[in-house]
Amino acid sequence: MQHSPALAALIEALRALPGVGPKSAQRMAFHLLQDARPAAQTLAASLQRALERVGRCQRCRMLTESELCDICASAQRDAALLCVVESPADVVAIEQSGGYRGRYFVLMGHLSPLDGIGPEQIGGAQFAALLAAGEVREVILATNSTVEGEATAHFLSQLVRQRGLKASRIAHGVPVGGELEYIDGGTLAHAMAGRQTL
């Protein structure tokens, strides 16, 4: 069945969301237009307002409505400690853990030469300038445990070491409360390789 042009465009736009396929996008579009028109108007207005007001922090590239995000603007954060993550969602996850008091640098992705994503696209020049400013003493590389995340961490660690700074990588392994029989082989291999003396 052919949808009207406006409905087809809405369905296609909803498919841009992560994890949303054609059927889910169609179901969302039908729901918004059939049962939730006031909610759809609120959603559209909120999205438009966010697009107009939310940008990137000039220092760390986190999403914010100000020149500097709250973390970069805070005098309570340790400026010598810099945690590099792939996305704003990673910052939120680390902040919710409550165990980190340094600052961040958000890559907004990872290196992926096949997709045309190189150092320029992940803020390589801005990262190097941040290191050159002289405040940072240690960089914690908290990129994902994927092939691309590992390659990105390796590339960034070289930039850090060239400046004579300490580069560390977050630990990978068995989660707290996890049972070994349910852990995948790759995670167990990382855990065994990164074991510590008691």
Image (cartoon, helix red, strand yellow):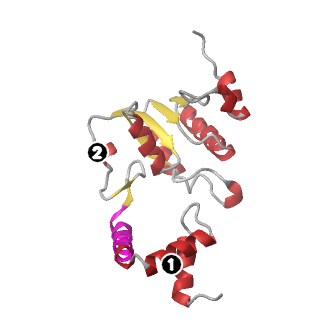
Residue 35 occupies quadrant: bottom left
Name the residue located 42 percent from the left edge and 45 percent from the top edge: 92
Q: Is most of the magenta stretch helix, strand or loop?
A: helix
* Label at residue 30: 1
Name the residue located 59 percent from the left edge and 42 percent from the top edge: 144
Asked if the stretch drawn in magenta spans residue 42, the answer is yes
104 vs 93, nearest the viewer: 93
Q: CA distance from mark 2 to mark 1?
A: 43 Å
Looking at the rendered image, the quarter that the N terminus falls into is bottom right
Q: Are marks 2 and 1 in contact (CB under 8 Å)?
A: no
Name the residue located 62 percent from the left edge and 72 percent from the top edge: 22
The span shown in magenta is 40-54
Q: Nearer the viewer, mark 2 or mark 1?
A: 1
Image side of residue 103 versus residue 177, left or right: left
* Label at residue 73: 2
Task: Report the amino acid beneath label 1.
Answer: Phe
Q: How many marks?
A: 2
Q: Position of residue 23 (x, y in %)?
A: 61, 71
Q: Position of residue 192 (x, y in %)?
A: 68, 22
Task: Report the amino acid beneath label 2.
Answer: Ala
The answer, for residue 133, to whether it is visible in the render is no
